[in-house]
Image (cartoon, grey):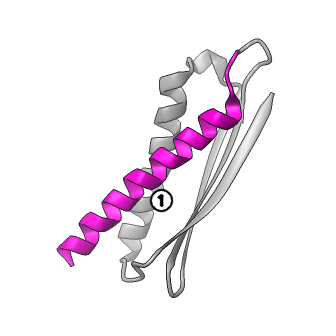
């Protein structure tokens, strides 16, 4: 069983440094991976791939793409797990961006 999810969120904070953009992307990836491995043992995951894209325009677009493959004997709702991980990542990123905006 395998599944993947993708969402785009528009955040109105275009003034970020290159370092801050990289930090936000890594933060999102780390939150997704942590959430998956909090729910599953490492041996339960055949493959996991988390891709983060951040595009700057009038708004800041964060795109998270998650690919998760687990063996058929692992009883988990992969779609739900991915959705929860992505939601958690966006919440953490939003909080981080609000911190950055507050310092600016």
The percent coordinates of residue 98 (x first, y second) are: 29, 66
Vertical relation: 81 (above or below) 103 = above
- Quadrant where the N terminus lies? top right
**SS class of the residue under badge 1?**
helix
Judge whether residue 97 is colored magenta.
yes
The percent coordinates of residue 20 (x first, y second) are: 36, 68
Vertical relation: 2 (above or below) 89 = above
Q: Residue at x 56, y 17 (%)?
A: 41
Magenta part of the protein: which range? Answer: 75-104
Q: Nearer the viewer, residue 99 or 17?
A: 99
Query: How many numbered dots are placed on residues in this image?
Result: 1
Vertical relation: 86 (above or below) 8 = above
The percent coordinates of residue 79 (x first, y second) are: 69, 36
Vertical relation: 36 (above or below) 8 = above
Q: Is residue 52 left or right of residue 30?
A: right
For this orientation, the residue located farthest to the bottom is: 58
Q: Quadrant of residue 52?
A: bottom right
Q: Nearer the viewer, residue 4 or 21?
A: 4
Q: Is residue 73 left or right of residue 102?
A: right
Tell me if mark 1 has few (under 14), some (14-19) or many (20+) residues whose alpha carbon lies within 10 angstroms of its own. many
Q: Quadrant of residue 57?
A: bottom right
Q: Residue at x 71, y 15 (%)?
A: 74
| Residue marked by disc 1 | 25
Judge whether residue 93 is colored magenta.
yes
The percent coordinates of residue 96 (x first, y second) are: 32, 60
- Quadrant where the C terminus lies? bottom left
Q: Residue at x 45, y 43 (%)?
A: 31
Magenta stretch secondary structure, dominant: helix
Q: Residue at x 65, y 18 (%)?
A: 44
For this orientation, the residue located farthest to the top is: 73
């Amino acid at each position: 069983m395998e599944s993947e999810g993708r969402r785009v969120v528009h955040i109105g904070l275009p003034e970020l440094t290159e370092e801050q953009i990289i930090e936000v992307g890594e933060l999102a990836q780390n939150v997704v991976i942590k959430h998956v491995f909090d729910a599953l043992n490492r041996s339960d995951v055949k493959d996991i791939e988390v891709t983060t894209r951040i595009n700057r325009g009038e708004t800041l677009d964060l795109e998270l793409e998650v690919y998760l493959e687990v063996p058929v004997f692992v009883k988990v709702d992969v779609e739900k797990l991915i959705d929860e991980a992505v939601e958690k990542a966006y919440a953490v990123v939003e909080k981080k961006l609000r911190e950055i905006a507050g310092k600016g």
